[in-house]
């Protein structure tokens, strides 16, 4: 259902999986709303869906499917499923169809329930229940607590329906699989796969755009002697961007440094208020969203890249793509000491740790990275090679073939 007009973790993962399978000469048929065919290998068969779904429509559909029986969904969204069925034209009746992202996964469940496809396998990108539960636990008003707890319960009901009816599920880690089995015991008997969140070939081969970098240096008056601390990602409640700003505020008077932030999201207003309150307008620069293929160039402006995620169950289960992207920059990286990260970063082999949700710990990690910058560059000089060889979809997708 995604039209790929906005890049994010879900679209990047879909591209990575499909493109690598196509490169290995497996037949890939992509049924979607996208018109951005240049993002995909030319031997991928594109089938146009032409069923646009807005963010608001997505939220309403997901909420309703979590609460009411699926036959009522068929009545309420008759025109949508008629269009999808017309696109399928019975050509995939005997095929297993794969779905990615929350909306896709729910659509797959409905299509099977309506007899429009034989069976589906869902890639579980993200865990909405954990995000909503975290927001409910940390809400400061009764109204917000009720709102997010309600969203948590509805998403739990939805996951139960969709996961229990799936033929198989693709998890990002064994810990993630264990979590879902504990929540929905029927999942244990599915055809399950472990395919970590890793990087696509495009992310590996992306180069610094020298012309764009020079424009950015001039636009933001990047001075050689200053240190640039950098973040790129979503401003989720669990994302920790306010913690990063708080940590930066704790060191700004002792270092010639600036903080460059790429992205947007729910905590943007909180972040803007923090910057204004602490009079950091000339030290913290918000760059907004950028095209994913420009990320490497923006990273090249930086000295230290920070992934400031707060303590949350989801980050304990999976490694975020922004962490791997950061390692590919060749810069010094700071990341929370989640169990998932520790599996690939023993003894700080790839990056500097901090204790998630602990601003003092993040501040100390930042100070350490700045004070030992040259030493750390030497320690992490092989990061790019290591990630390229071990943490890509090219090295992981064969699990789906098997």
Image: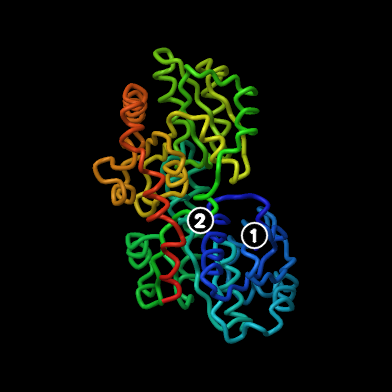
Assess disc 2: are there few (<14), some (14-19) or many (≥20) residues with their C-alpha within 10 Å of its C-alpha: many
- Give the image location of residue 225, x and y in percent: 47, 16
Residue 360 showing in the rendered view = no
Q: Nearer the viewer, residue 213 or 348?
A: 213
Query: Which disc, if any, is residue 200?
Result: 2
Query: Which disc, if any, is residue 2?
Result: 1
Is 194 placed above or below 390 here? below
Query: Relative to 186, is 34 on the left or the right?
Result: right
Q: Which quarter of the rendered picture does the C terminus lie within?
A: bottom left
- Give the image location of residue 289, x and y in percent: 62, 39
Colour pattern of the rendering: rainbow
Query: Relative to 313, is 12 on the left or the right?
Result: right
Q: Nearer the viewer, mark 1 or mark 2?
A: 2
Is 392 placed above or below 107 here? above
Q: Which quarter of the rendered picture does the N terminus lie within?
A: bottom right
Query: Relative to 313, is 68 on the left or the right?
Result: right
Q: Residue at coordinates 50% horizontally, 73% vertically from top-left?
A: 121
Assess disc 1: are there few (<14), some (14-19) or many (≥20) residues with their C-alpha within 10 Å of its C-alpha: some
Query: Which disc, if any, is residue 50?
Result: none
- Give the image location of residue 89, x and y in percent: 71, 82
Q: Nearer the viewer, residue 146 or 128?
A: 128
């Amino acid at each position: 259902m995604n039209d790929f007009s906005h890049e994010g973790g879900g679209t990047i993962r879909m591209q990575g999986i499909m493109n690598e399978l196509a490169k290995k000469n497996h037949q890939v048929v992509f049924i979607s709303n996208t018109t951005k065919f240049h993002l995909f290998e030319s031997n991928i068969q594109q089938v146009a869906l032409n069923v646009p779904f807005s963010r608001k429509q997505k939220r309403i559909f997901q909420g309703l499917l979590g609460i009411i029986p699926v036959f009522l969904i068929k009545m309420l969204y008759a025109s949508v499923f008629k269009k999808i069925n017309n696109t399928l034209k019975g050509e995939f009746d005997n095929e297993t169809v794969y779905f990615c992202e929350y909306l896709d996964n729910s659509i797959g469940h409905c299509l099977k329930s309506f007899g429009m496809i034989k069976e589906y396998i869902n890639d579980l990108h993200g865990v909405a229940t954990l995000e909503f539960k975290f927001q409910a636990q940390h809400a400061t008003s009764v109204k917000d607590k009720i709102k997010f707890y309600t969203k948590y319960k509805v998403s739990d009901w939805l996951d139960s329906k969709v996961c229990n009816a799936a033929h198989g599920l693709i998890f990002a880690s064994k810990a993630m699989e264990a979590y879902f089995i504990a929540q929905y015991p029927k999942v244990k008997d599915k055809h399950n796969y472990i395919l970590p969140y890793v990087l696509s070939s495009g992310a590996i081969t992306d180069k610094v755009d020298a012309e764009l970098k020079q424009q950015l240096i001039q636009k933001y008056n990047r001075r050689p002697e200053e240190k640039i601390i950098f973040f790129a990602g979503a401003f989720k409640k669990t994302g920790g961007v306010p913690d990063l700003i708080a940590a930066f505020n704790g060191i700004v008077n002792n270092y010639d440094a600036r903080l460059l932030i790429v992205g947007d999201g729910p905590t943007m207003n909180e972040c803007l208020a923090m910057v204004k309150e602490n009079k950091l307008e000339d030290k913290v620069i918000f760059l907004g969203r950028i095209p994913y293929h420009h990320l490497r160039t923006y990273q090249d402006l930086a000295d230290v890249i920070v992934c400031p995620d707060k303590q949350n169950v989801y980050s304990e289960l999976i490694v975020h793509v922004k962490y791997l992207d950061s390692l590919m920059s060749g810069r010094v990286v700071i990341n929370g000491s989640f169990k998932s990260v520790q599996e690939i970063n023993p003894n700080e082999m790839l990056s500097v740790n901090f204790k998630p949700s602990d601003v003092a710990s993040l501040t100390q990690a930042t100070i350490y990275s700045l004070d030992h910058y040259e030493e750390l560059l030497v320690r992490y000089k092989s990061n790019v090679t290591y990630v390229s060889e071990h943490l890509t979809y090219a090295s992981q997708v064969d699990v789906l073939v098997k």
